[in-house]
Amino acid sequence: MNPIYILCVEDEPEVLAAVVRDLAPFEEKFPLEAASTAAEARRVVREVILPRGKLGVVVCDHVLPGEDGVSFLIALQQDPRTASARKILLTAQAGLAATVEALNRAELKHYVAKPWNPEELRAVVRRQLTDFVLEQETDWCPYLTVLEADRIAEKIRQQPLPGDG
Amino acid sequence: MSIPIRSLERIREALASMPETESVDRPFAAGEVLLREGQCSDWIGLVVQGEIELLKRDTSGGEHSVGGLRPGQFLGLLLLSSGEPSFLTARAKTAGRMLVMPRQRFLLLLSNLPGFYQMVGPLLLGNLVSRYRRVVQLHLQVAELSRALGEEKARLQATIRELEATRNRLIQQEKMATLGLLTAGIAHEINNPVASLARAADAIEPALRAVLDQPIGTTELEVLRQGLSEGLRHQPLQTEVQRERLEQLSLRFPDLPRPLLRTLAQIQPAVLEEMVHYVISHPSVERKELARRWVEMFEVGALVRTMRVAAERISGLVRSLKGYSRQDQAEWAEVDLRDGLRDTLVLFGYRLKRFEVVVNLPVPLRVRSRPGDLNQVWTNLILNACEAMGTHGTLTLSGGTEPDGSVWVRVQDTGPGVPPELRERIFESGFSTKKPEDASKGGLGLGLSIARTIVEQHGGRLTVDDAPGGGAVFTVHLPGAGPSARPGHA
């Protein structure tokens, strides 16, 4: 099975460590990659994630050295291989204009303000991963334990049995 | 006052027919000067036809029309008895003619020739009355004009006061806009350490519980202490290095969960090898358990370090903020400009993140100043450079001293530069290259104007030039604090 990756982009090492720590419970099923700049994140997507699996969720800061988070998310949206990835902005400071741009051009799914509540961050990531899995995968059972079990179970029930139709 | 042409003609004929008047007919052309101011004349003329303009020179040499003569009026009347130089210039407005008589003769005839006075007397009297009327009218006009001037002056003063109030209001608005940017910057800068502080505090508890969930022997305690110190010493790895180590570890220990491998990747390779050897050489349950607790303790140490770093960042920010906002102290003080420059860079760090920032401030830059005001200058120059560069570029801050003790600070960007014809205009109030829809981003086009005003209040100069290799460079020159403040200049 090709793994579905979570990618975190944050330039402050201590903050990145906290995000990674908070999302560790998902790693059982969803390997996590971390990058400190948009350029590095692009490299990770190209050289690590896409050769092995898919990009499921991106948690990205906006204010980064060099290219900013929103323009990185837009670039992901424009690439057919990563367009379906769910994009989350985790930031202390994205102006209204940048956020609107992310909404319109990168299909931003969620905006989490710093400092964040870890439970809330996990809930957001869990929902987005669930959406991604339901949309992109056909076998949902392996994810029941880490994702929104109710929604996955409901979806499994609605599936036509092999004998139907 | 006008004389009926017929009676004037009769008078002219009568005068011309009397040889003792020695009168001569004198035609004149339009524009001809008949009498010049300051010159003496020995005749008097009765205008018979045409118009004559009277002119008076003012102290600065300009000529003003002060009236005119029509048929029936005398030219040279004011000089009749005194014989002084002419008070006015008389220039023919149209072609015409006058009857000219020698002045002395005219005076003589007035008292000696029977019938002469009866003829010209009413004319003379009429002339004087008409000139007196003119004087009264002029007085009234002068009074009216000075009243209108007074009103105009009052209106202008009110307008100037209004403009000053508007300018002050705009400066205040610009300051508020900068304050808004500053607040946003602090919010951003402080949020990151606050987030990592809070998240580390949250993570420490479960890690400690995981260590303390079993009794600890003396030898184990020593091992755990070492784990803690190792964690405290730990410097966060670059994400690339960490990824590479994580990759190797996951190949080597495919059964271990990734979060654990990620922590192991943080440990110094030599220390990690020692621990791996300790477990693998005698793979007992106790040894594995101790290794697990060692890793937890390492994590605790790393979290404590994270918290220290975050706390230090926050207190650094607060220090910068205190230094920056010395605006309240309006007093002059001797300062090293580098402090204010560094505070400004720290507080606007989030705006500068996307740019390369080069700081070259090797020597103290001591000046007498109002430090808060100068911080406004650095802020405006730095924000201006950021706006000029857009999404990427290099901001270079440099400073130094001149042989005469004065100091300079340069803010250089790699933006499009300032065309020569705009180099003075950019310092004008309200001049902005930004489009109106960008105005919400903070600028009112006053930033550079305010910066220059403040620099000039400090007795300095603010200029702009081309930077070598493109972009603009703004230079602030300020007088030094004086010889006592320059111990380096022996």
Image (spheres, rainbow, N blue to C red):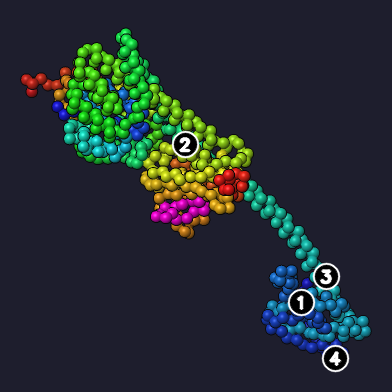
Q: Name the residue under label 3.
A: B129
* Residue at 57 percent of width and 48 percent of height: B489
Task: Please tell me which residue lies in front, A139 or B307.
Answer: B307
- Residue B69 placement, left or right of A108: right
Q: What is the span of residues highlighted in magenta in the rendered image?
A: B461-475
What amino acid is found at the position of numbered circle 2 in the picture? Leu
Question: Chain ID for label 1?
Answer: B
- Residue B460 placement, left or right of A139: right
Dot 1 or dot 2, earlier in sequence: 1
Q: Name the residue under label 4.
A: B19
Tag 2, which secondary structure? helix
Residue B47 locus on image (x, y percent): 77, 80
* Residue at 52 percent of width and 56 percent of height: B424
- Residue B439 placement, left or right of B83: left
Q: Name the residue under label 2.
A: B347
Q: Distance between the residues labelled 4 and 1?
A: 31 Å
